[in-house]
Image: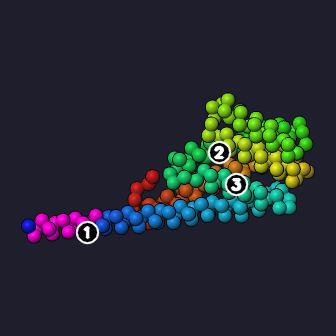
Amino acid sequence: RDLHKEYRRQRQMCIRDSNNTFMHKKKQIQLISSIEIALIGFICLISSKYISTEHGDIWLLGGLWAAISGIIVFQNKVKLTYRAGKVRIIGSLIGSIVASIFLLLFSPEVWLALPIVFTSAMICKLLQLENSVRLAALTAMIILVVGIINPNTPVLINAGLRLAESLFGVIIAFFVRYVSLHIESKLLNCKKR
């Protein structure tokens, strides 16, 4: 009887220890994930200042757009980050093309938001790219807004820069995720995801 009691006590201690270890690792992963998101945003924003060809404070919008892209595609697993990045790039490409066509035909005005977003969304739906609809619409909108704020920037340069910023954000997200996986596996002594 005492032996059985001792066994149960030790088993309960092991369960408690494994739960504490699990919770500790979970908190470490949450901390690392938060650091990754902060790094993605910071790297995108600060890099934009040095790689942007735009004048004034428009580079801030470019950095913000890259940061949004990187943060949107960031996932806890590399495979999911890759999928989200692919969706982001396809959506950005469609939104860039649609916005370019409209802005080559019309001067940048707020009313263009309606046909630009509608057309971007419709093309994605017709191509059965449901996951890219919102991203295409957002990209088209940012191109329109930058065109309104800075009408002297040529349309194709504006669209090309927004597409490049999206791609840059996705690349930064991949890079940060890849590097942090190596750090995580060493810190947590767990296998790669």
Segment colored magenta: 2-15
Residue occupying image coordinates x 85% and y 49%? 147
Q: State which tag comes first along the sequence, 3 or 2.
A: 3
Distance (Cα) linking label 3 and label 2: 11 Å
Q: Which residue is mark 2?
A: 88
Q: Which residue is mark 1?
A: 13
Question: Which amino acid type corresponds to the residue marked 2 in the rendered image?
Answer: Arg
Q: Secondary structure at mark 2?
A: helix
Colour scheme in use: rainbow
Q: Which residue is mark 3?
A: 66
Residue 175, quarter of picture: bottom right
Q: State which tag comes first along the sequence, 1 or 3.
A: 1
Query: Looking at the magenta stretch, what is its main secondary structure?
Result: helix
Residue occupying image coordinates x 28% and y 64%? 15
Question: Which amino acid type corresponds to the residue marked 1 in the rendered image?
Answer: Met
| Residue 186 visible here | no
